[in-house]
Image (cartoon, grey):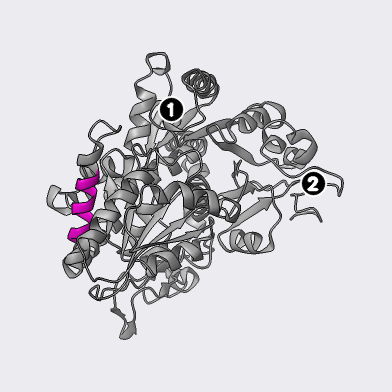
Amino acid sequence: MTDAAGLPHSTNDTQRGILLINDEWGTGNGGISTINRQLAKIIAHCNMRVYCTSLHKNEKDKTDAQRLGVELVFPEVEPSDEQASLKWINRQYRTYFSNLANLSNIEVIIGHMQITSEGALKIRADYFPDKKVYLFNHTIFRDTEIQKTDCLMREVDDREKKMKEEVQKCEKVFSVGPRMHRYLKDFHDLTNVENHQFLPAADCQFAELKINQSSITSDVTLLTFGRVSGVASLKGYDIVAKAMSEVAGRRPGARRIIWRIRGIPESEHAKCEADIFKDITSSNIQLDMRPYGTIDDICDDIQQSHLMIMASRSEPFGMVVLEAITAGLPVLITVNSGLAEFLTNHFEEDMVSHVIVKVGVNNVDFERDVTCWGNKISEVIEDYDRAFKRAQKLKTKLLDCDAVKKSHQLFIDMCQEKYKSSAKQVILRMEKNLQNRLTMKNSNTCCWIPEIQPIRPVAHIGTPHSTRRDTVIYGYNVPEGKPIITNLWSVHHDEKYLKLFHHR
């Protein structure tokens, strides 16, 4: 139940609860929100009660969350309040999220490092002092932050120092992908931290997309994701611009190359267009810039494109490209990414070698890197049928990846570990009690329950099951997936099967 402000009332439910601390529910701002939504979905599927904070009250988000079994917690605001920001979560949570204290069933608080980790730790300290905090790591400061135009090395040091302090205050850390997992492991002063690797999966909506598989005979649409201002070098936009110009030069008389970039606010279009066009040397390239969008927007982008490119000089993971692979779209990704490392670790070389582009992390071999990207892009465009078939094979392998499933199960186990421990204690206590009964001298005392159960079973019907395949039960055809419920009362009172009833 929630009040008029969208905040939960006090609850005495015994169902275990997980509280995710994030600034939004939707996926409008990229990877972190996408993974946060995925975590909520995983937990809710395991019959845990899930709450998630969101700064902006949105009926569409609320409906989507409820559909997945998640209850959104919105801030309590006044008309005179300033614009919502992360400080409402990290510093002013007593004012805007005070009703979180009414949740009596919370066992784990989940935050996102450098985004809501500060708030997650403070909310735990004030409202749930005996509960656990799990933090998710989404960045590698020394690889990514230093390549941003407005970032200094001392700022990287300060952020890493704060990250270490937060990590040491939480119970567990989940690093998204192999690169970030290794990044935390390499800190000698964090060796005592419980650091697990989490491998994300794309939403099932992407697996259901229908991708255009026809050969390229006219315009070709290439798709990239991420903002430009301040991170153009990090995201490799200069390399992509020159590589596309090379490709256009190899296709005389061909139609346009449409470069769609998702993640650029409309207010930055003019500046970003100027920044990108200074590296474009072909008049055959058209920019199509769009702001961050919803899952539906990303699905439309994927369906309308021929190829997705991630040319970052360093990328912690690459969630949106994982979504494209899940959809079956041909992709090209930099070797300097967590996604490339994940694919290399878990799939055969011939399955992923055509996807990964081996380039440097700086401009020492800039011209060679441009040519390398140009060759890879041309290879896809010139034989799109082959690229598409390869993409379908990779999609199939990815959807059946055991490493991803095990990663999710580990996360579920960590969220449930208190209850698993409690269940084990109950079982041990039951075994001890049973042993005590078996050693009692008066056998009547320990036998009356088993004796009476055949006459009056504890439950009249058994636990529902379902058929794993089409089958026949006593002449009745039962299709796969249909529920099967045992009538225990009938079994215990049918003298055809229980002759012992004649003696009672």
Chief secondary structure of the magenta span?
helix
Give the camera-side residue of 438 and 397.
397
| Labels 1 and 2 touching (C-beta < 8 A) | no
- Which percent across, then down, holds residue 265? 57, 53
- Which percent across, then down, holds residue 427? 45, 38
Residue 430 in magenta stretch:
no
Q: Secondary structure at mark 2?
A: loop
| Three-letter code, disc 2 | Glu
Residue 182 can be seen, yes or no: yes
The magenta segment: 370-379
**Circle 1 sits on which residue?**
146
Q: Is residue 245 left or right of residue 231?
A: left
- Which percent across, then down, holds residue 72? 66, 52
Q: Residue at x 51, y 54 (%)?
A: 41
In space, the residues marked 1 and 2 are separated at their CA atoms by 37 Å
Q: Is residue 328 left or right of residue 149?
A: left
Image vertical order of residue 406 relative to residue 393, above or below: above
Circle 1 or circle 2, nearest the eye: 1
| Three-letter code, disc 1 | Ile
**Circle 2 sits on which residue?**
76
Give the camera-side residue of 278 and 75.
278
Residue 377 in magenta stretch:
yes
| Name of the residue lying farthest toward the top | 189
Give the camera-side residue of 29 and 163.
29
Q: Is residue 467 left or right of residue 157?
A: left
Q: Residue at x 50, y 53 (%)?
A: 263
